[in-house]
Image (cartoon, rainbow, N blue to C red):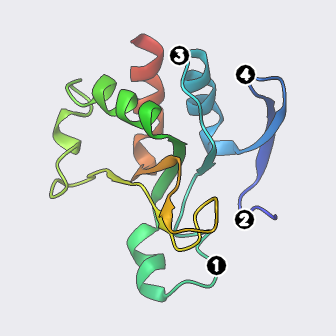
């Protein structure tokens, strides 16, 4: 699978290598150091949206994406939701609001419809450095 953004290859906590979008490298390192698992990431979803509609591209341009196990996504939200840098960004109607979804696929993992085992956390990419700082200082 090709990547729309330049990547840097990092050694993951389990010893494998993963291509990480360069603008997310400090955040991913901070998350891994704090014990979070990630399964995917993108530094700007709108730029990477490929064949999706112009509406979707416009909606997600400027938003970063973290994919992580649901428990880790919930732990991340709990860790940041009341910090001064993020407490005003957690409500869906706020400027710079985050969006968290658990996709349900029609064919799931065993052929039946079902949820993915990971959550997709989307947030404005101008918050990446703040998020890395909050995770590092927690």
Q: Secondary structure at mark 2?
A: loop
Q: Are marks 1 and 3 in contact (CB under 8 Å)?
A: no
Residue at horizontal 63 percent and vertical 59 percent from the top? 109
Residue 106 on image: x %, y %: 53, 74
Q: Residues within 10 Å of mark 4 (few under 14, many from 20)?
A: few
Q: CA distance from mark 4 to mark 3?
A: 11 Å
Q: Are marks 3 and 2 in contact (CB under 8 Å)?
A: no
In the picture provided, is 31 more to the left or to the right than 71?
right
Residue at horizontal 42 percent and vertical 55 percent from the top? 102
Q: Which residue is mark 4?
A: 13
Q: Secondary structure at mark 1?
A: loop
N-terminal-most mark, 1 or 3: 3
Q: CA distance from mark 4 to mark 2?
A: 24 Å
Q: Nearer the viewer, residue 102 or 95?
A: 102
Q: Mark 4 or 2, which is nearer the eye?
A: 4
Q: Please give the label number shown on residue 50.
A: 1
Q: CA distance from mark 1 to mark 2?
A: 9 Å
Q: Residues within 10 Å of mark 1 (few under 14, many from 20)?
A: few
Q: Are marks 1 and 2 in contact (CB under 8 Å)?
A: yes
Residue at horizontal 19 percent and vertical 33 percent from the top? 87
In which quadrant of the rendered image does the C terminus lie?
Answer: top left
N-terminal-most mark, 4 or 3: 4
Q: Which residue is mark 2?
A: 4
Residue 86 on image: x %, y %: 26, 34
In the picture provided, is 6 more to the left or to the right than 108?
right
Q: Are marks 4 and 1 in contact (CB under 8 Å)?
A: no
């Amino acid at each position: 699978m090709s990547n729309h953004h330049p990547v840097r290859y990092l050694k993951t906590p389990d010893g494998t290598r993963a291509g990480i979008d360069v603008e997310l490298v400090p955040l991913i390192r901070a998350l891994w150091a704090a014990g979070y698992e990630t399964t995917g990431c993108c530094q700007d979803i709108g730029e990477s949206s490929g064949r999706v509609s112009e509406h979707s591209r416009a909606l997600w341009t400027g938003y970063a994406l973290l994919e992580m196990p649901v428990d880790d996504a919930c732990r991340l939200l709990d860790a940041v939701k009341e910090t001064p840098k993020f407490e005003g960004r957690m409500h869906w109607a706020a400027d710079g609001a985050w969006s968290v979804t658990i996709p349900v696929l029609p064919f799931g993992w065993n052929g039946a419809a079902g949820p993915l085992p990971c959550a997709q956390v989307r947030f404005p990419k101008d918050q990446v450095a703040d998020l890395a700082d909050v995770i590092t200082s927690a």
